[in-house]
Image (cartoon, rainbow, N blue to C red):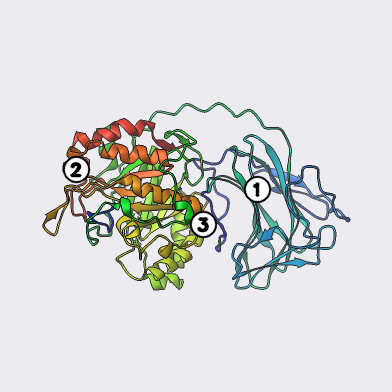
Amino acid sequence: MSNTTPPVHPSRPRHRAPTEPSAPARATRRGAVAATVVAGVVALPPAAWAIGGGLTAARTPAPQAKVAVAPGELVTNGSFEDSLTGWKVNRPATQELARGNQAVSGAWSAKLRSTTGGNVVVNDAAPTIPSTTAGLSYEVSAYVRAVGEPVRGKIKVREVSRGSASATSKQSFTATDAGWSRVTLSYTSQSTGAKVDLNVVGRKLAAGDTLLVDDVSMVPTGDPATPPPSTPAPSSPAPSSPEPTSTPTSSPTRTPTPTSSPTSSTPTASPSSSAPTSTPTTAPAGGCVTNPMGIPATGQTYLGASSGHGDIRDREGQVGSTMRVHRTYYAADRITAAVRVAKQDVEAGRLPWISFKAPHSWAQMSSGAGDAWARELADGLATVPGPVWLAVHHEPEKDGDLDLWVGMQRRVAPIIHSRTDNVAYTVIYSSWNTFSNDQNTIASKWPGDQHIDVTAVDAYNPFGATRNGRTSSKHLDMRSYYVKLAAWAKAHGTAWGIAETGITRAGAQDDPQWLTRAYTDMVELGGAALSYFDSSRNSVADWRLTDDLRRDVFRERLPGSARIC
């Protein structure tokens, strides 16, 4: 469990600007985006060659004169003839973007280099499509060429709705210095009102090597199609084989219980944190989440628990349904066990939400001592046939210098993102330290929007919990936290949720609807996941779901909550 008290422990997504090379293409995973990708890399001079997966493309000559802009062209300045207007790099400290005098047509192209070695990305500065219409198809293409050693990369389209990537289409390529290659993919928008981000990525360039990009294009190819009928929700999957239960590795007892209601806390988000107390939902709380990283649409909310009491299937048998999210905790040397349990979770229909302790100090991790560990972890989680949520050292507030913790997140997150397509990187804070302490806001410990997919806190109801000989008689207003989390998430482009919560038996008897409100308010305000800490370990109270009063909430809400596909 975590470090708040009473304990007072108490949403795009997307992978952004990786600095590590992506692993080879993997098998289709659960929750894969429905957009069809039809791809080819067309190299010059003429010949025919096969592309991985059985697709083939014919080599065709590059045009000798500047290609006219196609009707309906959506890309701004895709030829780079006059300037670099409309384009940017994701990491200007290490990535260089200039104009090159080798071009597939015309006189200029975009020239990308890494000053330190690593990935390079040329990204549209504004969404190529400001607002999508569901079912509309597009052809996306770009010409690429290497200067120096061959460069592997991908052209990628991300559909971003309410700050989270709801769909991603991409096609890999290998650029060489033998000539220009044309990369193409077909993209079909999955939602209405989303923004579309377009970029070309070169992976693991050596210092001094160059990737050239020219004639980037996106044009509509058809009218909006009638959305397919939704698929009826399948019945709860059968329990998976027995799985080990990990023990939470942090203590939740270090922060004092607040003496006043948290509703008076000042929001820590940007000005948009003065959000209304409710946000219209755009999807039902239940339904199948198809996002590769398991990020649900607004209004879809997972409900689940940890398995600190024992085998998660035992509790599922008592509540009559499969938990939609499963929180587990691991020491740094437990990667193999974590991957095994995550696979079992996905097979059973649960979203694995994993916390790891780091193998080294935060300072050492920030300096790269944990890079090999992070790569091993990423490569293991990439084999899970569905989405995984990952946090490295949750609730850091009382464990050391938070600047060093932030540095560790900035080092580890890009490694995880660059080597996986299914892992959402999460940060999990102590709610008391975040919302009841003006010196310790989310802003003061934020790794950066490009690194985080889900922002979460641990928030517990202290009623009936005894600490230092005093038993609390206050209930936590979870909604007040939700408003602040929702405002921050909206401003910074993440999903949001509660990674741990709990209420004592006495608290449930005093306010029988508290846990129900905790879930229904989250659905209303757009939260992605609510996970209950079903344990008494490392805690000041017994939060276990050992009575019908608390278990009934799960009986009532689980069947209709969101689930991974």
Amino acid residing under circle 3: His
Residue 347 in sight from this viewpoint? no
Judge left or right: residue 162 versus residue 179: left
Judge left or right: residue 377 versus residue 511: right
Amino acid residing under circle 1: Gly
State the separation of the CA atoms marked 2 and 1: 58 Å
Badge 1 element: loop
| Residue 8 image position (x, y, % from top left) | 25, 54
| Residue beneath disc 3 | 417
Residue 368 in sight from this viewpoint? yes
| Residue 304 image position (x, y, % from top left) | 33, 41
| Residue beneath disc 1 | 52
554 up-or-down from 328: above or below: above
| Residue beneath disc 2 | 507
Q: Nearer the viewer, residue 4 or 33?
A: 4
Residue plotted at (49% across, 47% down): 293
Judge left or right: residue 161 versus residue 316: right
Please tell me how many numbered marks the rendered image carries. 3
Judge left or right: residue 157 versus residue 410: right
State the separation of the CA atoms marked 2 and 3: 40 Å
Tell me which label, 2 or 3, sits earlier in the chain: 3
| Residue 531 image position (x, y, % from top left) | 33, 45
Residue plotted at (59% across, 70% down): 93
State the separation of the CA atoms marked 1 and 3: 23 Å
Residue plotted at (11% across, 57% down): 469
